[in-house]
Image: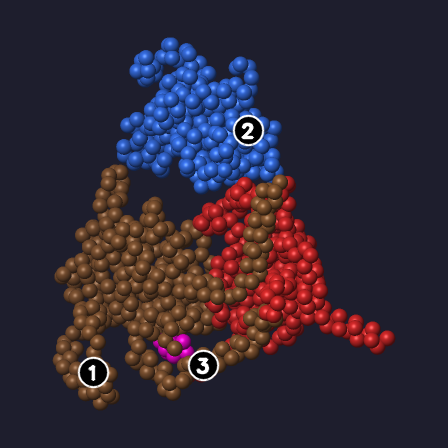
Amino acid sequence: MMLEEPILSVKNLSKQFGDGCRRCSDPSTRDLIKNYCPSCGMVFACRDISLDLYPGEILGVVGESGSGKSSLMKCLYFDSDVTSGELYLQDEEFYGQNLWTLSAQKKRYIRNHKYGMVYQNPVHGLKMDFTSIGNIAEKLIAAGNRNVDNMKMVGEKLLDTVHIPLFRMKEEPRNFSGGMQQRVQIAKALSNNPPVLFLDEVTTGLDLSVQADVLDLIKRIQREFGISMIVVSHDLAVIRMLADRTIVMLNGEVIENGLTDQILEDPIHPYTQTLVYSLL
Amino acid sequence: MGYVAVKGGTNAIEASIQRLKYERLKGKEVIEVETILKTMRQLVDQVMSEASLYSPYLAALAIKQAEGSMEEAVFLLRAHRSTLPRLYYSQTVNTEAMFVERRISASFKDIPGGQILGATHDYTHRLLDFDLAAETKADIEKWTNQWMEEIKEIESHGELKHFPKVVDYLREEGLFPTYPLNNENPDDVTKKSLAFPASRSERLQILTRGQTGAVTSLGYASLRGYGQVHPNVGEVRVGDVPIYVASSNENTEAKDDEYYIGDVKLTEVESFVPVTTKNERNEMELNFEIGYGICYGQNETKAIAMSILDQCLENQDNPFSTHDEEFVLYHIDSVESTGFISHLKLPHYVTFQSKLDSVRNVKKGRAEDEKA
Amino acid sequence: MKKLKTHFAFLDEGSKKEIRRATLKAVAIPGYQVPFASREMPIGRGWGTGGLQLTLSLVGKEDVLKVIDQGADESVNAVSIKKLVHSTTNVELTEATEDATLIQSRHRIPEIPLTKDQILVLQVPMPEPLRTYEKKEYITKMLHAEKEYSGIWLMLFEQIMKYGRTSTDADHPVLVNERYVMAPSPIPRFDNPKMHHSEALILLGAGREKKIYAVPPYTDVASLAFDDYVFQKEDFSGEACHLCGATDVFLDELVDDHTGKTIYQCNDTSYCVDRLNKLEQEEVSTVDA
């Protein structure tokens, strides 16, 4: 598997909030509490993160809140700017180009054509007062589709895949339960057939039985569509169920990286050990 | 033919204008512009403020022409303003040099220089004075002469005309941050249309020429709960300030080369608003910021409301509409809001025909679906 | 007090230059809304002050001006605007579309195709086609910059989902020069195709919203429509003007006072009068012969 070229590759990503002060700009005098500089209040959300995502795999990113995993996701999806670093997509159009240096227009193009995103809160991924079918069409329209019947067909198929009854497709997601909203969001994210799908804490806040449904759905989608995914979660159980490989983040840094089974069976970093034992 | 409504426009308009003129003249009384100027001081002030053109005479003329309609008078002055080229920008006005007529602080009892109540409606009892109905010129003469006599003694004592700002007193105590003077040229909203995020100079210009009622309502809404600014009025001052224009000779910076072009009367308000800030050591501190309000003439309610909105727009990370600069700045101008509301009176026959077609087609489509 | 004389074409020359500069920029970037420091005019703000400023900044002593409102030269607001321009410029006025060099219009494009020697100025109430789903100017500017128009397409899609067809009326959005989505002003859909490859320069002015934009001659203008739900003009098939008999024109729907029946009449009044005159001449000449 490692012989393959990664579909998405991050090199030395750093993301900071704040301008920094004399003490924390110099790594030798830096004295942080977790990832926070007490003298100026600067936050080092992501520190020198590198990772690769291979075609067809699910990469898990696990860590507690404040570990930088959500910042990482926002940077990958261009929801927030990076301080420094490089991002490459294995794609004819963008081969060898650092995506973070592209224009806003190009970044939007990548989001519309190459990416799918499922947010923890469906409010961020859905237009709550548009129809469910319209929500899916929005992504298709953004990706250049101008055929109503075709979009309707694709939308119906996807809604069916995520078990939304078709007679409700013209309803607005705001009328739906949390689990249903999350499934519409997944359908929307899948609609443009993205090579890369991001899932950010997608089961957090859902009932246990609904969580299991959504996780099943993601597994099934990976099998059927072969999409490469990055799954961010604070919940090791979710990671265990979904991810082939996992990275563990703490205070903005990657502290452990390997096959998920390996990390679960033989955690090396003391923090990972605590995490794993608390799961058992 | 049923469609004469929009035809014959030329004659209809001419007749309507004559009718309007008749409405103004039918009482057979002439009101002198001078009379408006001398007796309707606050109306003149408000028209100048909303029109953003300082000319009491033209404002009075506009009031006469508009039969006292604020909306129309402001509109007349604004339209007149469009015909005038912008020849100069004045030097920065220093309100410390104001010839103060009235000056109060709601925050401190003992302000340096003292409180001066001046002329205000604040403590009048709002009871209709029926004596005014029979007021004569002789009454006026008598009263004013008597009053002038009474104050002669007092006037001759006090030579002090300039007052320090209340805020300076607090600055010395370190309660207000001291900022370096900002000598950037302001953006001129009459020369460059507003873009967002707006600069503070743009915001202040739009607020000061805002419709008094609109500025007051939004300031009130913010104060009542639809906003996060809870000010103390630090200082309200009303008085004349001199306006200077720099010499056209660009090489000379000397003060002697400034031209004095006249005085304008202003109301200026500095509101004190507590804010949480962080110091260099990243500790939370409670500080004061200033909400600034200013307008032509004496219009204290508008100036205070403006000071609230100024602070609202300095702090836009807030869910309330009163803190949203597009919401506030786009909707408080008298000429814009009255113009767009009143345009609804224009015929919309074509647009309506188009809408009819659309609704009929949807209905027809439904009916055909049902048949099929 | 001395009586002031109003300047030629009302605005001072500095303001006119500035408006012309914005206009040039608008012509250079078809469909892009150029901000300008819109002046207060002597007519209501929202009553065509954008169009009026364009007209006044362009008008010269040689120009022949036509003003229409809702298709009619004699409509009250058209008369009012004409009167103002005439009183400050003394230019020749006309009702005949083909005689005009400058045509200011609200909500219609004349039926007679315009030529390269003419400029059409349209009055615009709401220049931002994206405003219905995004209230903030700051955001809509960004969406235009990034050519992100899925929102407006989604509105059309939702209409089709709900009503089985698009339900837009006037002001149906267009894509200009394959780049900017533009509000064509509240002209009926019937007039949208007239913008495509128009021989005349079309200028659009929004006074209250302080924007100028343009469709230069021979520019692509496409009404937004999905591949399988084509753009449809208002349908007057089977109807004709009860006065001049014209068919392929935008018709007003009227109720006959006597019979109570619906009758149709040309909305473009000068077009109708012109046809009536020509028909009369033909009749006269046949009688003569």
Q: Secondary structure at mark 3?
A: helix
Which quadrant, please, contains the C terminus of chain A? top left
From mark 1 to mark 3, how far is it between C-alphas? Answer: 32 Å
Q: Is residue B12 above or below residue A216?
A: below
The answer to which image quadrant residue C261 occupies is: bottom right
| Chain B color in figure | brown
Q: Secondary structure at mark 2?
A: helix
Mark 3 and mark 2, same subunit? no
Amino acid at the residue labelled 1? Asp
**Residue B131: mark:** 1
Quick check: A5 above or below B167? above
Residue C89 colored magenta? no
Is residue C39 in view from this perspective? Answer: no
Residue at x 25% of width, y 48% of height: B275
What secondary structure characterizes most of the magenta part? helix
Residue bearing mark 2: A157
